[in-house]
Amino acid sequence: MTEDKLQQLRIASEQKRRSRTPLWLIFGGVLVVTGVVGYFAVPRTGDDVRSGLLSNREAATQKAGEDMAARNQMLDTKRGTNNSNASAAAAKLASAARVDGSVLTASGYIIARERIEVSPRFMGVVKWVGVKKGDSVTNGQTVVLLDDSEYRARLAEVDGQLAVANVAVDKARLDFRRAEALVRQRVEMEKVLDDSRLAVASAEAQVKQLNGSRKLIETWLDWCVIRSPVNGVVLEKLADANELVTPQNFGGTRGPSTSLVAVADLNDLQVEVDVGDTDLAKVQLGQKCRVAPEAFRDRSYEGRVVEIAPEGTRAKGTLQVKVQIQNPDRFLTPELSAKVDFLGTP
């Protein structure tokens, strides 16, 4: 029984034989299949034409090219418009330059032709200040008073000495007349008459000396009254009441004030500009100019070159030029900036 089962499980010898199919046929079939797949998998130029469709990569490339072409065309158009606008603006500026005759434009600062700082003639104490910044003053107007009590006391002293001297003169003259009579009567010698004459001259000289001292003190008293030297406007008030002032500074920042007020005539204004050395050939004395303050660009004033500095500034390579403003008004303020157009040769 057992042997029968084993016999059934045993493989027959004819079944153990290999297939006679050659191996090269198997490999050949695999190669054929691989070639066919590769043929259809690799993209070719003709595929798009045959199928009428584009691959994703080529579609994206073509879209980017179209966008770039459109952008380039837009930039060319815009560049042409900008060039046209720039040309038009340049032509407009050139035309404007030809119309107004401006050969050079420079910026500077408005200044008063004469800015006067009124100072005391001697050391003193301010008693009264009658002006403030911005006030209009006239020539000769009293603006500051200094303390004059010391000089008035000296004046009183000299007046007393002068009175004594006048009495001495009267006595000397009386003695001279008496001596003259006695000499005529031959009671006294000529020497007495000569002495009397010299005594009169000495007394009169003393009176003259005291009168001179009195006038000096009167001058000092007059100097205690500070007056404006010009018609103008007070630009600064540099001292206050009860402050010590002096005509010269002792050094340091805490010394006495050397000025009382600063006054300028605002009807006599100039513009101070620095012209580069490369533009000096465009500027001449007497040349007409147009002045426009930066604060009021819609206003302009006629001007004329009145001064060209004889020496330049090496560090900046410039030369200072002053332009006199004709008919200035309240819109022009010293130390503010202004633009100057030089309008050709004078």
Image: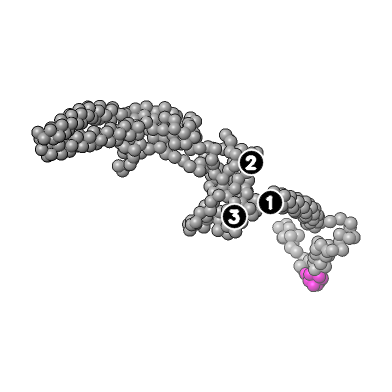
SS of the residue under disc 1: loop
Residue type at mark 3?
Val
Q: Where is residue 166 in the image (x, y as percent from the top left)?
A: 22, 29
* Residue at left offset 56%, top offset 45%: 324
Which residue bears the numbered disc 1? Answer: 101
To which quarter of the image does residue 171 belong? top left
- Precedes in sequence: disc 2 or disc 3: 3
Cα–Cα gap, marks 1 and 3: 13 Å
Q: Position of residue 6 (x, y in %)?
A: 72, 60
Quadrant in the picture for the N terminus: bottom right
Q: Residues within 10 Å of mark 1 (few under 14, many from 20)?
A: some
Say whether residue 186 is visible: yes
Which residue bears the numbered disc 2? Answer: 300
Vertical arrangement, residue 300 with respect to residue 313, above or below: above
Q: Are marks 2 and 3 in contact (CB under 8 Å)?
A: no
Q: Which of 344 and 98 is in front in this view?
A: 344
Q: In the visual, does 283 lie left or right of 32?
A: left
* Residue at left offset 13%, top offset 35%: 183
Residue type at mark 2?
Ser
* Residue 26 is a magenta residue: yes
Q: Give the range drawn in magenta.
A: 18-28
- Precedes in sequence: disc 1 or disc 2: 1
Q: Which mark is residue 283?
A: 3
